[in-house]
Image (cartoon, rainbow, N blue to C red):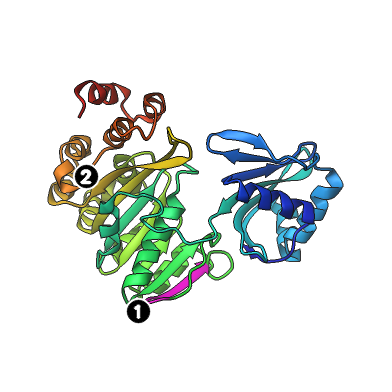
Amino acid sequence: MTNTSNPQPQFHDALVVADKQGASEVHYAVGSSPIMRLADNFVPIDGFPALTPEQAEEITASFLSQSEQEYLRARREITGAYTFPNGLRCRYHVFFQKGYPSFSIHLLPQNLPTIESLRLPKIVETLSKLPHGLVAVTGPYGSGRSSTIAALLNSINQTRAARILTLESPIEFIFDSAKSLVEQREVGRDAESYEAALRQILGEDVDVVMVAEVTSANVASLLMELASSRLVLAMFDDPTSVKVIEHILSLFPAAEEAIIRSTLADVLGGVVVQRILSRAQGGRTMICEILLGTPSIKTIIRDGKLIQLVNIIQTSRAEGLISLDQALAEAVRANEISADDAQREAVDPHYLQSLFKRGA
């Protein structure tokens, strides 16, 4: 749900302060002062007292529409997006704890991200140039998945004529059409469901589809069908490329696995796996694993030999593939991140250690 009302001033001011300091999240609960996440730390927002029950109700009443307030009372939580008059935009989660509303806010950049501003590997830009295929962007919460997808869509919008249609819940980044026509639908408001919207797209003149959630086998099946002739960008929360592929296959009955593997192999364009870590020199940096739909990758998926995928990713650097552990090792060698942080994020800590030892 998307809202543009004017919330309680204290709440607004706290978010503005957090945004100016580069925070990614703000949390505000009854009995506590607002706190923000700066890099990997929680920091109090100075000058704001503890939230009272009355203020929490005031924020809720000013922040949400009447229908959204009714939804919150019935469901006890609600998510949505909000744009301030000054252009600051955020994604919110309002929920009850200890009988009172609490607020978890994710601050969104005011400028659309680009592949350059995110410092993504150059190979990622090639994914936006694919005429068709499935591109998955995955990682844990807070890893910058929506920013990367927005950067890919931004690249398409600025460079070629295409009809782009996004399905989100809620809409995060707002696009103005440039060379492309960009249409954004919010599931629950503009579309009944992901599945219903995707079925409609099958019969429409759409070149690029973005889906923020893959919620079922039906949705995954529709995405793969669309990806045979359109470019499809989809968001997942799996930790590695292999896990994304296993996740998609796991949505279907075992009896269908062979045909699903074949279909997925045919349409797979690539997978981008992300982590955001603290930079040694300050700030944060994005580390990416890249899997591309090369012939060898497609053959392995089609044959069901997924256990071999890790080795192919690790040994195909010349083709643009790189494992998360290899990317972490490269970032340590470049003094971008600490070895300790790399070790904590490693998929295979022993393999990462071996990369450190041989300098590869």
Q: Residue at x 66, y 63 (%)?
A: 84
What is the secondary structure assignment of the residue under circle 1?
A: loop
Whole-number angstrom distance, CA of label 2 to CA of label 1? 32 Å
Q: Position of residue 104 (x, y in %)?
A: 65, 46
First to last magenta residue range: 178-185
Q: Is residue 182 magenta?
A: yes
Disc 1 residue type (three-letter): Asp
What is the secondary structure assignment of the residue under circle 2?
A: loop
| Tag in front: 2 or 1 | 2
Q: Residue at x 72, y 60 (%)?
A: 64
Q: Residue furthest front?
A: 281
Quick check: 72 left or right of 313? right
- Residue position for label 2: 321
Q: Is residue 132 magenta?
A: no
> Considering the image in quadrants, where does the N terminus appear?
bottom right
Q: Position of residue 8 (x, y in %)?
A: 78, 56
* Secondary structure mainly formed by the magenta segment: strand
Q: Is residue 163 above or below residue 291?
A: below
Nearer the observer, 243 or 149: 149
Q: Is residue 159 above or below residue 64?
A: below
- Residue position for label 1: 205
Residue 49 seen from this side: yes
Disc 2 residue type (three-letter): Leu
